[in-house]
Amino acid sequence: MSIDKIYEQVVNRNPGEVEFHQAVKEVLESIEPALEQHPEFVSAKIVERIVEPERQIIFRVPWIDDNGDVQVNRGFRVQFNSAIGPYKGGLRFHPSVYLGIIKFLGFEQIFKNALTGLAMGGGKGGSDFDPKGKSDNEVMRFCQSFMTELTRHVGPDTDVPAGDIGVGRREIGYMFGQYRRLVNRFEGVLTGKGPEWGGSLGRPEATGYGLVYFTQEMLKDNGEDLKGKTVAISGSGNVAQFALDKCLQMDAKVITLSDSSGCIYDPDGIDRDKLEYVMKLKNIKRGRIKEYAEEYDVEYIEGGRPWGFECDVALPSATQNELNAKEAEELIDNGVIAVAEGANMPSTPDAIETFLEKDIMFGPAKAANAGGVSVSGLEMAQNSQRLSWSFEEVDSKLQGIMKNIYRTTADYGQKFGSEGNLVLGANVGGFMKVAKAMMDLGVI
Ligand code: NDP
Ligand code: 2IT
């Protein structure tokens, strides 16, 4: 079947799942040149198989709120591909979650995980539960109910979930507590755990730090350096916070942050004290980024996104499709030379096209944000050994992994597309490893 026909079939078989269609389309368009060189993949129907999840689980999550009323949410786990290792990927708790979002994320995760060089298959899960405005007790009861069902489908050698939007250390703790209670075993079924109960040092920092390590590799390969650069970051959650932290360590200036209500612009730069304020605001008080503007008397744009300011580097780190073609043009007009994706699929397809056409350095999500899942892989390794590595050891491994991912992506981009096309490079690089494994494993 031709790539066009396969795509058409994906759209027909998965009606209404627009984010999933978008993710599949980008990968299918990229891998055409690789398929020409590997006709054996075509006759073994590797592509037809890779776009179909191995297993999709949808379940009821009933729980009782603080008023004593019963609430019902929907839970998901899509176990997409286990050709190169146990399913691995985060859980997202956000009201926008439906099967199409989980499938897009699970599909991306297959190739991202392959690029890390670690033995991890692809999966993703979550719920339409909204943690915003809920008490800790409500979040705990929800997590316990969610995990009561999920427990039968996961395990340290089967499927190892982690965090994503709306799921951090608090939620992982409640879920791990419930799993341990149900199976009566202390084992590495989740990553992103607290360091006192089996978590890896450096996992909270890993996605943001990895994003900046990747960005620095990309800049250096093009004769530039992050030092002294002005950076626009979107989001203000886990990825955004630690990307900002690493930018400060590398002497770059970060001028923006955002949340789903709006964005702030701080032309003086968000320094370490201000970052500490953001971390307390977002992780403990669970407040809005608007409060930053009030605290430091800077501009707040209600409903705005941070792509309209002068900057050299942009790191979209909030959510999917948060940067469109018009905003890509605006960034370019404002002097941007490099964009790297901290979030999953934050740039729309026409925004990516704009960046590539204008020769802006562009680090796609699969490669640029793979630091998080990489350190999750390292957490799994530590759990298996019942050992804990130092922060420095984990961080130096993360740096090595991000360098390798950049090299693999750049090399595949050059070999199968054009120099500097890291989108194609990441898609082909990830695909080749999984496709070769699927060939060896027979028709699975
Ligand atoms: P968090 O929940 O910690 O933070 C999410 C941030 O994005 C918040 O600032 C949130 O604002 C904002 N946001 C969420 N949804 C929307 C929306 N619909 N519109 C605008 N802003 C929104 O999540 P993470 O930082 O962990 O995740 C951010 C991105 O990074 C996601 O795309 C995730 O898939 C990706 N990612 C995360 C990894 C990880 O290790 N955590 C690893 C790799 C990728 P608000 O507070 O208003 O909701
Ligand atoms: O999108 C992602 O890579 C994540 N949310 C992290 C997955 C993980 O298993 O650590």
Image (cartoon, rainbow, N blue to C red):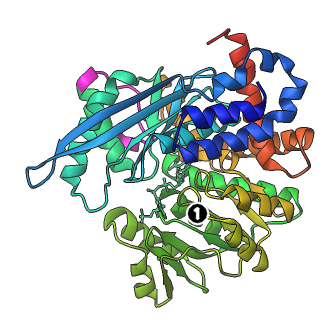
Ligand 1 is within 8 Å of the C-beta of the residue at disc 1: yes
* Amino acid at circle 1: Glu
Quadrant (top left/top right/bottom left/bottom right) for the N terminus: top right
The image shows residue 315 at horizontal and vertical percentages of 65, 63
Count neighbours of disc 1 (C-alpha within 10 A) and say few if under 14, some if 14 to 19, many if 20 or more.
some
Location of residue 328 (image quadrant): bottom right
Q: Residue furthest bottom?
A: 297
Does the magenta run of residues contain 192?
yes
Q: Residue at x 57, y 76 (%)?
A: 256
Quadrant of the rendered image containing residue 119: top right
Taking the image as shown, residue 233 lies to the left or right of residue 223, namely left
Q: Which residues are magenta?
A: 182-199
- Residue at the far top: name it: 442
Asked if 159 appears above or below 220 in the picture, the reply is: above
Residue shown at 76%/32% (left/top)?
A: 3
Q: Is residue 326 visible?
A: yes
Residue 442 against residue 324 in the figure, above or below: above
Disc 1 marks which residue?
322
Q: Secondary structure at mark 1?
A: loop
Res 398 → quadrant: top right
Q: Position of residue 362 (x, y in %)?
A: 77, 57
Name the chief secondary structure element in magenta: loop
Measured along the vertical axis of the image, is residue 11 above or below residue 242?
above
Residue 223: x %, y % from top left: 89, 63
123 in magenta: no
Location of residue 47 in the rendering, given as x and y in whole percent from the top left corner: 71, 26
Foreground pick, 213 / 348: 348
The number of numbered badges drawn on the structure is 1
Which quarter of the rendering shows the C terminus?
Answer: top right
Question: In the visual, does 11 lie left or right of 410?
Answer: left
